């Protein structure tokens, strides 16, 4: 109840006798299922142990009655596991690259907020009266965030390599290039939000709901896309983070190149262009 | 005094209604979001793509494939022509696992002393589904192996059934993911809602230049703070009720403990998060700054809600750190009451920790500028200096 233990094993008082006389295994396992992942792990583990124990007992029995060949194992099939790219299946090796997309969500939020900020303070009209073209204005608003974002793209892999020893097997220029496209798509998303929304709180709420929350749950970083319902998979395809997750996953561990990653890159580029177009068109109409 | 506080509360609500986008997004957008995300991710991992290279093509190899299919973890499998195809699919990230059945597998299996071999390749670039695949394959193969071993011994397949330990899972009988993840998402949503509304309260007034107007009014600073806090608490609590009702109805998350206790503690948690948001709000110069800080704080807290990895399996340092995160205690309390039906007798350390953190957060503002902080340090009240807000 306190959550101090995950599993408990109850051994009946008749345990020894029952096993010796081959009557059964009076063993009870209690599992705290609150957290299914570790609960399931505990089940598997204890079950496996119990099995080994039973096999040993049986073996003894068989040998004692002299039934000839000993039962070497209850597991005649030899299962050889080979893990590619990430021996030991360390989750930090794929979660940390996945989290880069979340960090790059911050510039997108900032774009949405600066546009809303100008509108809220009434300075957007002032900008409009200057000879700056609207498209130029939108692009100029993005450039500082592109620079900051790209700095992150360089800093995070270095940090994760040094601090967490995450291997980086791919080509860094390629990663940089694809990250720039991702940033472009994310900033486009932020811009669409900024163009439609009038106040900063609303812009924040919307970008939270469109960028951060689905960014962490729907992009396949924590939960495989294949297991989601079809409708959600379609929606996930509209999120830049989904495509970017594929890219980070491919570049960091397997170290694949553009020949494999180009569909994701193209999808990001297309999404970015669509967002930008929507932003530019409605920006003209709104003011 | 109460009339003055009341008038600020009214003013806050007028502002919220006029700027209805934000509350609408946060409350109903959040609900919708929780519903969708919960629906998408709160199921066991199924349909994982699997590739099979069957070099044996015997009855036995087909039996293996059927066993794998019956686990329900894998989608229909593609047959690969050779190892290169498997390698390429793994590189592309198209599959999570591949099973290779070598030639002669069936023959080895039939012979009484044969040692059939199977190979499984996992895509380590996605560790979570890879682990799930491994579990499913191991389980299926173990069952098959047992059957075969018993057949070789010449005993009936039911011989061992007495030797399986009896298993009982408590609190979450079906080990359902939904019961674990939706409370985490609920907790996160609630935290963000409260933090955002609280962070807005002062930074917005300051940025728009209306804070000075508030300060010159015949209101004490305590009245301003309490007046601004009440709407946030109301909204946060309302949000909690909405989300709780939804997880109960849509995802069947039970409330096994005392609902009253849960509501009281939720109220306390809202107050703690409110304190955090207010500290951010008072310190921040612009809304933009306040929001970025809120998001950063939220991301850190997110790591401790147990969504990505359970706190118990984190490194020791992180576990110690978790004790300083209100969200961690809150999630423990929430899960304890919802799933385990735990009461105060069990949860008191977490409640105490939450209260302690609340007090620390509350007094933080006293230390930084000698101002008051709700009721936690009412004695600071007289020292209040308006400069503290304007800076």
Image (cartoon, rainbow, N blue to C red):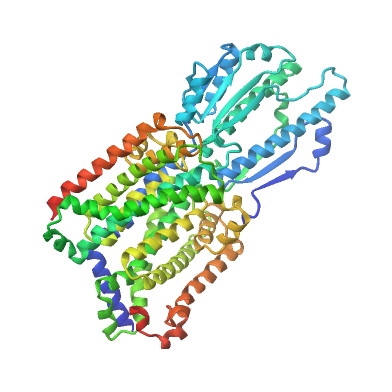
When the figure is inspected, residue B171 is found, relative to residue A267, above or below; the finding is below
**Name of the residue lying farthest toward the bottom:** B382
Residue B214 appears in the picture as rendered: yes
Count of numbered marks: 0
When the figure is inspected, residue B349 is found, relative to residue A287, above or below; the finding is below
Q: In the shown orientation, is residue B113 left or right of residue B204?
A: right
The quadrant where residue B186 appears: bottom left
Q: Which residue is at the front of the view, B198 or A164?
A: A164
Percent of width and height locating residue B120? 58, 26
When the figure is inspected, residue A26 is found, relative to residue B61, above or below; the finding is below
Percent of width and height locating residue A56? 79, 30
Q: Residue at (47%, 37%) from the top-left corner? A: A170
Percent of width and height locating residue A276? 23, 45
Q: Residue at (56%, 43%) from the top-left corner? A: A37
The quadrant where residue A49 appears: top right
Q: Which residue is at the front of the view, A248 or B127?
A: A248
* Quadrant of the rendering where the N terminus of chain A is positioned: bottom right
Residue B307 appears in the picture as rendered: no
Percent of width and height locating residue B231? 33, 69
Q: Residue at (27%, 53%) from the top-left corner? A: A142
Q: In the shown orientation, is residue B130 left or right of residue A278?
A: right
* Quadrant of the rendering where the C terminus of chain A is positioned: bottom left
Q: Which residue is at the front of the view, A146 or B325?
A: A146
């Amino acid at each position: 109840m306190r959550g101090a233990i995950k599993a408990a094993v109850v051994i009946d008082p008749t345990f020894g006798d029952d096993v010796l006389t081959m009557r059964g295994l009076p063993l009870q396992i209690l599992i705290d299922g609150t957290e299914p992942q570790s609960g399931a792990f505990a089940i598997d583990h204890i079950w496996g142990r119990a099995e080994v124990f039973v096999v040993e007992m049986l073996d003894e029995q068989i040998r004692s009655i002299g039934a000839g060949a000993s039962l070497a194992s209850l597991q005649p099939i030899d299962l050889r596991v080979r893990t590619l790219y990430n021996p030991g299946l360390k989750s930090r090796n794929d979660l940390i690259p996945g989290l880069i997309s979340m960090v790059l969500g911050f510039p997108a939020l900032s774009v949405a907020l600066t546009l809303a900020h100008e509108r809220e303070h009434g300075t957007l009209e002032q900008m409009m009266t200057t000879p700056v073209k609207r498209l130029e204005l939108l692009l100029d608003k993005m450039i500082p965030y592109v620079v900051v974002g790209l700095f992150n793209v360089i800093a995070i892999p270095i940090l994760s390599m040094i601090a967490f020893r995450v291997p980086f097997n791919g080509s860094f220029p390629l990663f940089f290039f694809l990250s720039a496209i991702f940033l472009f798509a994310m900033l486009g998303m932020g811009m669409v939000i900024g163009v439609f929304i009038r106040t900063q709180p609303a812009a924040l709420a919307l970008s939270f709901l469109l960028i951060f929350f689905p960014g962490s749950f729907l992009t396949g970083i924590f939960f495989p896309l294949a297991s989601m319902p079809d409708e959600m998979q379609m929606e996930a395809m509209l999120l830049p983070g989904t495509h970017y997750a594929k890219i980070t996953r491919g570049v960091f561990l397997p170290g694949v190149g553009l020949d494999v990653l180009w569909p994701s890159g193209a999808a990001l580029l297309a999404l970015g262009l669509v967002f930008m177009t929507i932003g530019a068109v409605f920006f003209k109409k709104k003011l | 005094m109460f009339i003055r506080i009341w008038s600020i509360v009214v003013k806050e609500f007028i502002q919220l209604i006029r700027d209805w986008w934000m509350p609408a997004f946060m409350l109903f957008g959040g609900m919708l979001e929780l519903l969708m995300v919960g629906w998408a991710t709160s199921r066991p991992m199924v349909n994982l793509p699997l590739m099979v290279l069957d070099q044996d093509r015997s009855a036995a190899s087909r039996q293996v494939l059927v066993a794998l299919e019956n686990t329900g973890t894998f989608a229909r499998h593609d047959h690969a022509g050779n190892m290169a195809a498997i390698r390429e699919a793994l590189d592309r990230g198209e599959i999570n696992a591949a099973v290779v059945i070598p030639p002669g597998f069936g023959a080895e299996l039939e012979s009484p002393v044969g040692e059939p071999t199977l190979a499984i390749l996992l895509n380590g670039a996605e560790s979570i589904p890879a682990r799930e695949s491994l579990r499913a394959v191991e389980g299926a193969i173990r069952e098959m192996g047992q059957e075969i071993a018993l057949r070789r011994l010449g005993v009936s397949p039911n011989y061992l059934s007495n030797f399986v330990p009896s298993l009982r899972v408590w609190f979450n009988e079906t080990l359902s993911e939904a019961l674990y993840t939706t409370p985490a998402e609920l907790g996160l949503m609630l935290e963000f809602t409260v933090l955002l509304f609280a962070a807005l309260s002062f930074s917005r007034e300051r940025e728009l230049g209306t804070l000075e107007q508030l300060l010159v009014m015949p209101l004490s600073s305590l009245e301003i703070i309490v007046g601004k806090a009440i709407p946030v608490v109301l909204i946060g609590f309302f949000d909690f009720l909405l989300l709780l009702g939804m997880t109960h109805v849509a995802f069947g998350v039970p409330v096994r403990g005392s609902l009253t206790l849960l509501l009281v503690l939720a109220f306390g948690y809202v107050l703690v998060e409110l304190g955090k948001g207010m500290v951010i709000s008072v310190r921040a110069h612009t809304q933009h700054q306040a929001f970025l800080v809120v998001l950063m704080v939220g991301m850190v807290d997110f790591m401790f809600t147990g969504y990505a990895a359970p706190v118990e399996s984190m490194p020791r340092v992180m576990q110690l750190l978790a004790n300083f995160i209100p969200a961690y205690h809150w999630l423990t309390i929430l899960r304890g009451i919802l799933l385990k039906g735990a009461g105060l007798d069990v949860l008191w350390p977490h409640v105490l920790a939450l209260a302690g953190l609340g007090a620390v957060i509350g007094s933080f503002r006293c230390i930084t500028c000698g101002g008051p902080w709700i009721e936690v340090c009412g004695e600071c009240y007289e020292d209040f200096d308006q400069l503290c807000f304007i800076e």
